[in-house]
Image (cartoon, grey):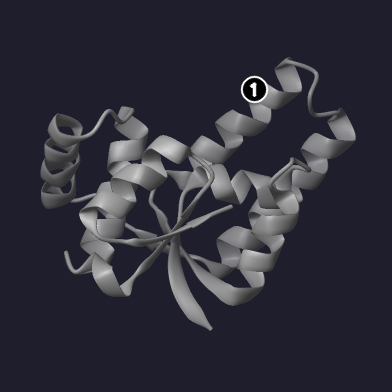
């Protein structure tokens, strides 16, 4: 099984029933998970937002939390470093990304040894996928 860097946007679809969930499940059978250090925090934030807006029931919230727990046991995390922060700041000058997305893409680049052409980047966010493609990743939309 090939390893891929997974953005939070794709992982949430594995835990919460969404339009992209079927595609995300197919990709999960194909690619192992590498994630940024704060991915679980971002996922928890997404679950809370969906619950507050009524898009996630209490039962759905509990199910999402269980799925996240299972995912965390199997994924590899990229830890924060000064070079990762520097790379994220650089990405913000090149692409119209949110701070969290710049950190995600920076973590993927660090994990790829700054040689992204042989690496896969999975996300549901179009703007992030475009930036990942432009820095050289093979992108896969979830």
Left or right position of 45 against 25: left
**Residue 103 position by quadrant:** top left
Number of numbered callouts drawn = 1
In x, y percent, where is residue 69?
66, 55
Left or right position of 73 against 108: right
Residue found at the very far top of the displayed protein: 53
Left or right position of 101 against 30: left
> At 67% across and 46% down in the image, what residue appears?
13
On screen, 98 above or below 27? above
In x, y percent, where is residue 95?
23, 34
> At 14% across and 46% down in the image, what residue appears?
87
Residue position marked by numbered label 1 in the rendering: 49
Residue found at the very far bottom of the displayed protein: 1
Element under disc 1: helix
On screen, 75 above or below 56? below
Left or right position of 60 against 65: right
In x, y percent, where is residue 97?
30, 31
In x, y percent, where is residue 27?
61, 66
> At 31% across and 57% down in the image, what residue appears?
108
Count residues near mark 1 (Cα–Cα under 10 Å), then give few for <14, some for 14-19, many for 20+.
few
> At 69% across and 66% down in the image, what residue appears?
26
């Amino acid at each position: 099984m090939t390893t891929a860097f997974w953005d939070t946007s794709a992982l949430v679809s594995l835990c919460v029933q969404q339009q992209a969930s079927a595609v995300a499940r197919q990709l999960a059978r194909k690619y192992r998970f590498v994630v940024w250090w704060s991915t679980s925090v971002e996922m928890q934030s997404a679950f809370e937002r969906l619950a507050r807006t009524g898009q996630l029931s209490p039962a759905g919230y509990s199910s999402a939390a269980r799925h996240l727990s299972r995912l965390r046991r199997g994924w590899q995390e990229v830890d924060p470093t000064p070079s990762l922060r520097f790379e994220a700041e650089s990405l913000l000058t090149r692409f119209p990304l949110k701070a969290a997305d710049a950190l995600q893409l920076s973590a993927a680049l660090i994990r790829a040894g700054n040689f992204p052409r042989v690496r896969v980047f999975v996300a549901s966010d179009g703007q992030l996928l475009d930036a990942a493609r432009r820095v050289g990743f093979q992108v896969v939309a979830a």
